[in-house]
């Protein structure tokens, strides 16, 4: 009888976890599709249908609605850096992180495939704008619609610091949003606050490289553009820039988590009841800009 109970419990866990991965995958497709079209509209119209501000607004609103769609069902773990942060704090099992990362990567990859299909095949927007050439650099470049590239003024070390600091700031603020000892938020407010945070980071730090902040959100589209015709320049452009938005967010996420834990969370006044409680459920918000422009 014990063996039967264990088997049933494991089957229930597998079913629940599989559904969660599928939901992350589908939601990543949806949210990549919505956010990339904001940048595509600006770039392919030469700024006639939007500007820098509309790109940031589109990224923030895309993330906000991505959270609203996901958080009630899956907890909205749509950035592997966030999952890593919770695992460091002991609030999320490490064994789930690789599978979450894979589902995000595949979702971002296919979300961009949908973007390219609509922009290149259905509407011809990329084809007309670029003259039929899929370029990474130059006045008719379109690769930046999908993933991040450094501005001309940005050095290697400047880009690395930019991504570490931006992701650390994101994690510090998101941990504050879901920290119930800071005060309970009304239902539905957390996604709005995270969206506002992403907008603030974009407006203040977006000009350097588009503040990607999410490794899967940058690497997935980059792999797709490599296959879809933009070629190996997506990895060689910017002096081999591609690995910075893939690696630096993990460093920034670790830094932000440690800063919040040491400077904020350990200083909360707790009662004996709070010390014995399992703590807040931190699987409530997604932390990702979704903006790679």
Image: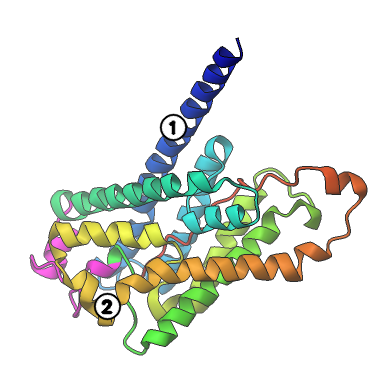
The extreme right residue here reads 272
Identify the element where label 1 is drawn: helix
Asked if residue 170 is positioned above or below residue 164 in the image, the reply reads above
Secondary structure at numbered mark 2: helix
Depth check: 37 or 97 in front? 97
Q: Position of residue 11 (x, y in %)?
A: 49, 22
Q: Magenta part of the protein: which range?
A: 123-144
In the rendered structure, does residue 277 fall within the stretch colored magenta?
Answer: no
Q: Residue at x 27, y 81 (%)?
A: 238
Q: Name the chief secondary structure element in magenta.
A: loop
- What is the tally of numbered marks visible in this picture? 2
Tell me, yes or no, whether the highlighted magenta stretch contains residue 135.
yes
On the image, which quarter does residue 228 sit in?
Answer: bottom left
| Direction from residue 162 to residue 245 in the image, left or right | left
Above or below, 43 against 275 in this view is: below
Q: Which of the 4 image quadrants contains residue 54?
A: bottom left
Say if mark 2 contacts mark 1, CB within 8 Å: no
Classify the position of the C terminus by image quarter. Answer: bottom left
Residue at screen point 44% across, 61% down: 214
- 214 with respect to 179 (left or right): left
Residue identified by numbered label 2: 240
Q: Along the line of sight, which residue is nearer the eye, 98 or 141?
A: 98
Q: Which residue is mark 1?
A: 18
Residue at coordinates 31% horizontally, 67% vertically from top-left? Answer: 42
Residue 251 location (% of width, % of height): 51, 70
Residue 233 percent coordinates (x, y): 18, 73
Instruction: State the quadrant of the N terminus.
Output: top right
Q: Say how the picture is coloured.
A: rainbow
Classify 10 Å Cα crowding around label 2: few (below 14), some (14-19), many (20 and above).
Answer: few
77 left or right of 103? right
Separation of disc 2 and disc 1 at Cα?
Answer: 35 Å
Q: Residue furthest left?
A: 132
């Amino acid at each position: 009888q014990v063996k039967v109970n264990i088997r049933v419990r494991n089957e229930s866990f597998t079913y629940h976890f599989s559904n969660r991965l599928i939901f992350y995958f589908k939601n990543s497709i949806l949210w990549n599709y919505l956010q990339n079209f904001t940048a595509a509209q600006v770039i392919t119209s030469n700024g006639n249908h939007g500007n820098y501000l509309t790109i940031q607004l589109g990224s923030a609103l895309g993330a906000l609605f991505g959270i609203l769609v996901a958080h009630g069902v899956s907890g909205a773990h749509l950035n592997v850096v966030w999952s890593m942060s919770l695992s460091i704090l002991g609030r999320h099992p490490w064994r789930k992180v690789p599978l979450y990362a894979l589902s995000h990567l595949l979702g971002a990859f296919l979300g961009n495939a949908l973007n390219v299909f609509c922009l290149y095949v259905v509407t011809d927007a990329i084809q007309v704008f670029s003259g039929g050439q899929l370029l990474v650099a130059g006045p008719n470049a379109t690769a930046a619609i999908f993933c991040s590239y450094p501005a001309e003024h940005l050095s290697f070390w400047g880009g690395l610091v930019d991504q570490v600091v931006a992701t650390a700031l994101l994690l510090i603020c998101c941990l504050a949003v879901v920290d119930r000892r800071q005060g309970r938020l009304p239902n539905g407010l957390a996604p709005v606050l995270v969206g506002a945070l992403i907008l603030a980071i974009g407006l203040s730090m977006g000009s350097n490289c588009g503040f990607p902040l999410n490794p899967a959100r940058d690497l997935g589209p980059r792999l797709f553009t490599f296959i879809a015709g933009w070629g190996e320049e997506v990895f060689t452009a910017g002096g081999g820039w591609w690995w910075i938005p893939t690696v630096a967010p993990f460093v920034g996420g670790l830094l932000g988590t440690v800063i919040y834990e040491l400077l904020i969370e350990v200083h909360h006044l707790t009662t004996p009841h709070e010390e014995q409680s399992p703590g807040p459920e931190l699987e409530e918000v997604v932390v990702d800009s979704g903006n790679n422009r």
